[in-house]
Image (cartoon, rainbow, N blue to C red):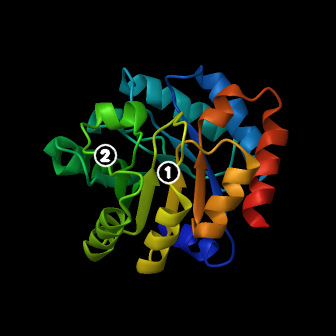
């Protein structure tokens, strides 16, 4: 069974939590320790990526450290082809649907596809859309942000992703966003698609986690929480328990 199939099967049974680690935010050895804590707390996968990365080596070292400390699948969440790593298990082969720059829609994919083929890491097709406020991800991705109350456009992007054959759809408000994707938008998107829905950005407390899960998010992604919490294991346990309630 592929990682994509395994995740889809798990989503059919319960809501999931993915931990997002940015190699630019901590040393590789610290990333490994955080990943171990995330696994112990009940996270289902480790995503690795960021908007301000400097080198492939940075990603390689982080992925290797994570692999040494956890048995969870490590899935790349790359901002470009040069940040792929042969040490990962899979990569979200994602098209940033609302970018104005063709590089983020398809051209970086053309560059990275031969590397993925040669390395043997699993490509997981995903439609990716950034909603207001967007934060650094929106700026770097040169995105025409979906307005936070523009439900129709969000649903359109989600359906287009599914019809293009994507396995997953990700709604993102941007790392560190002061407001997450609205419950109404999450609910509307989920009602219209048949593929797993990931939601991230601005999700930093139990109330918000419960709201997004109840609205229809299949997978909750948190990243900033992992960088700032002093009692990380307890914080993640609380988040994951809230998702599964």
Q: Position of residue 157 (x, y in %)?
A: 30, 64
Q: CA distance from mark 1 to mark 2?
A: 30 Å
| Residue underneath mark 2 | 145
Q: Indicate whether 145 appears above or below 61.
A: below
User: Which one is in front, 56 or 145?
Assistant: 145
Which label was assigned to residue 165?
A: none
Rendered image quadrant of residue 183:
bottom right
Q: Residue at x 37, y 27 (%)?
A: 56
Rendered image quadrant of residue 218:
bottom right
Please tell me how crowded label 2 is: few (under 14), some (14-19), or many (20+) other residues with Cα within 10 Å.
some
User: Which one is in front, 106 or 152?
Assistant: 152
What secondary structure is marked by label 1? loop
Q: Position of residue 185 (x, y in %)?
A: 46, 63
- Direction from residue 131 to residue 163 in the image, left or right: left
Q: Position of residue 71 (x, y in %)?
A: 68, 50
Q: Quadrant of the C terminus?
A: bottom right
What secondary structure is marked by label 2? loop
Please tell me how crowded label 1 is: few (under 14), some (14-19), or many (20+) other residues with Cα within 10 Å.
some
Which label was assigned to residue 89?
A: 1
- Direction from residue 145 to residue 182 in the image, left or right: right
Q: Is residue 114 visible in the rendered structure shown here?
A: no
Most extreme residue toward the front is: 149
């Amino acid at each position: 069974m592929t990682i994509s199939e395994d995740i889809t099967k798990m989503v059919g049974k319960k809501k999931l939590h993915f931990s997002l680690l940015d190699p630019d935010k901590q040393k590789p050895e610290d990333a490994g320790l955080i990943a171990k804590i995330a696994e112990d707390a009940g996270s289902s996968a480790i995503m690795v990526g960021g908007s301000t990365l400097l080198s492939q080596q940075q990603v390689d070292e982080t992925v290797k450290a994570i692999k040494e400390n956890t048995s969870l699948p490590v899935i790349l969440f790359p901002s470009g082809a040069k940040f792929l790593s042969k040490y990962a298990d899979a990569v979200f082969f994602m098209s940033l649907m609302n970018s104005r720059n063709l590089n983020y829609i398809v051209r970086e994919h053309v560059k990275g596809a031969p590397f993925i083929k040669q390395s043997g890491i699993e490509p997981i097709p995903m439609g990716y859309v950034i909603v207001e406020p967007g934060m650094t991800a929106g700026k770097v991705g040169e995105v025409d942000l979906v307005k936070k109350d523009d439900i129709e456009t969000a649903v359109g992007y989600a359906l287009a992703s599914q019809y293009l054959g994507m396995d997953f759809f990700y709604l993102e408000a941007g790392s560190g966003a002061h407001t997450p994707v609205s419950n109404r938008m999450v609910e509307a998107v989920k009602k219209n698609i048949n593929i797993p829905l990931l939601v991230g950005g601005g999700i930093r407390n139990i109330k918000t986690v419960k709201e997004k899960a109840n609205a229809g998010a299949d997978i909750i992604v948190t990243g900033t929480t992992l960088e700032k919490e002093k009692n990380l294991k307890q914080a993640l346990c609380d988040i994951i328990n809230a998702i599964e309630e």
